[in-house]
Image: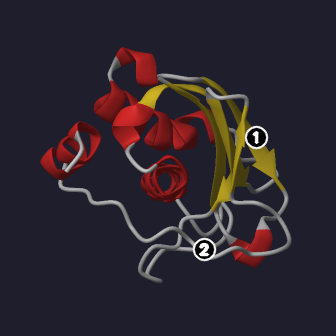
Amino acid sequence: MSKVEEKLAELGLTLPEPPAKGGLYAPAKLFGDKLVYISGCGTKINGDEKDGKLGIDVTTEEGYELAKKSMLNVLAVLKREVGDLDNVKSCVKVTCFVSSAPDFYEQPQVANGGTQLLKDIFGEDGVPSRSAVGMAVLPGNLAVETEALFELK
């Protein structure tokens, strides 16, 4: 087990199976020899995640947890691509898309669920640059979707 997965286990978390593709795209794309882009991943892990809009169907606290699950899916795709999460030097950039009611303004607090997970497992170097973006809708009525760019060792 990698050190990163040991840290996940200490947090009571395990990596899920990478999510199935939802269209015609590459789930991960290695470019150069040091960067890996992970396409947007939703929150579905065991089918029990809450769907809908933040501020209507989903609370900020629930959104935080969904962003964490979305990041677990990102990490599962990353592991499939690079073989071992210990090969990751840092997370460079994260974009967290949040399906939001027109008067919902707490997208950053939702996105913190995913970036806090990165900090917890990769340390301070795991804290990426980030955008938290409110969206009218997301595919499949997802509440949160996350994409990321990682630097390899």
The amino acid marked with disc number 2 is: Asp
Residue farthest toward the top in the current orientation of the protein: 124
- Within 10 angstroms of label 2, few (less than 14), some, or many (20 or more) residues? some
Q: Residue at x 30, y 32 (%)?
A: 120
The residue that label 2 is drawn on is 51
- Please give the label number shown on residue 55: none
| Residue 145 locus on image (x, y percent) | 66, 56
The amino acid marked with disc number 1 is: Val
In the displayed structure, does residue 7 sit left or right of residue 66? left
In the displayed structure, does residue 69 sit left or right of residue 8? right
- Please give the label number shown on residue 133: 1
Color encoding of the figure = secondary structure
Which of these two is toward me, 84 or 97? 84
In the displayed structure, does residue 114 sit left or right of residue 28? left
Marked residue nearer the N-terminal end (2 or 1): 2
| Residue 78 locus on image (x, y percent) | 52, 49
Label 1 sits on a secondary structure element that is strand
